[in-house]
Image: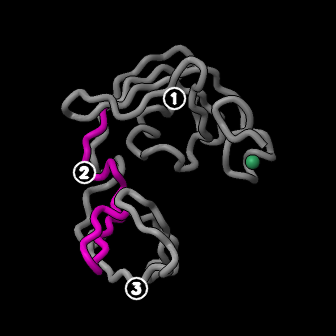
Amino acid sequence: MIADGKVVTLHYTLKNDGGEVLDESTKEHPFAYIHGSGQIVPGLESALSGAKTGDKKDVTVTAEEGYGEINPELEFKVERSNFPADKELEEGMQFTAEMKDGRQHPFTIVKLEGDDVHINGNHPLAGETLHFAVEVGPIRDATDEEKSHGHVHGEGGVQH
Ligand code: ZN
């Protein structure tokens, strides 16, 4: 049964409100995560607690329980001079910047306009209601090494 500290393998399809497929696992590449560690969105994690191998679930997750609402404060423009002069900038390029609280936060360059660089630090799926169709695969205990690394090793996880 899915509980905190278990390694869970999932097959899933993620669609938005319009029915467009945003993300999916494949037979060759199932997705594995450690339950209760915040590796998947909170709304899906809580819906999967107690599920068993073979269970199929359709889970709708609000933006709030998913990737968050769109935060307008994370969309702004900065001057080109904030970036290294020798770095070529392109729309769609991602980088991390240090926030006021010292955390590193990912941003995407959305538009280049003269000396202005428009950037957006919202998750690409922020503001979206998420529709997951999930099938639960094998469930096992996390190893001590996986617990200390904070991620799954082997199939569906990190290979190292
Ligand atoms: Zn590791």
Q: Is residue 160 left or right of residue 100?
A: right
Please give the residue where the numbered disc 1 appears in the rendered image.
50
Please give the residue where the numbered disc 3 appears in the rendered image.
81
Q: Is residue 112 magenta?
A: yes
- The residue furthest top is 54
Labels 2 and 3: the sequence-earlier one:
3
Specify start and end residues of the magenta stretch as a single range.
Answer: 109-131
Please give the residue where the numbered disc 2 appears in the rendered image.
127
- The percent coordinates of residue 35 (x first, y second) are 58, 40
Q: Is residue 45 left or right of residue 73?
A: right
Crowd class of label 2 (few under 14; some 14 to 19; many from 20; radius 10 Å):
some
Labels 1 and 2: the sequence-earlier one:
1
- Mark nearer the viewer, 2 or 3: 3
> Who is closer to the viewer here, 24 or 56?
24
Whether label 1 lies within 8 Å of ligand 1 gets the answer: no
Q: Amino acid at mark 3?
A: Ser
Residue at 50%, 26% (x, y): give it.
25
Q: Is residue 102 left or right of residue 32?
A: left
- The percent coordinates of residue 51 (x first, y second) are 51, 25
- The percent coordinates of residue 52 (x first, y second) are 55, 20
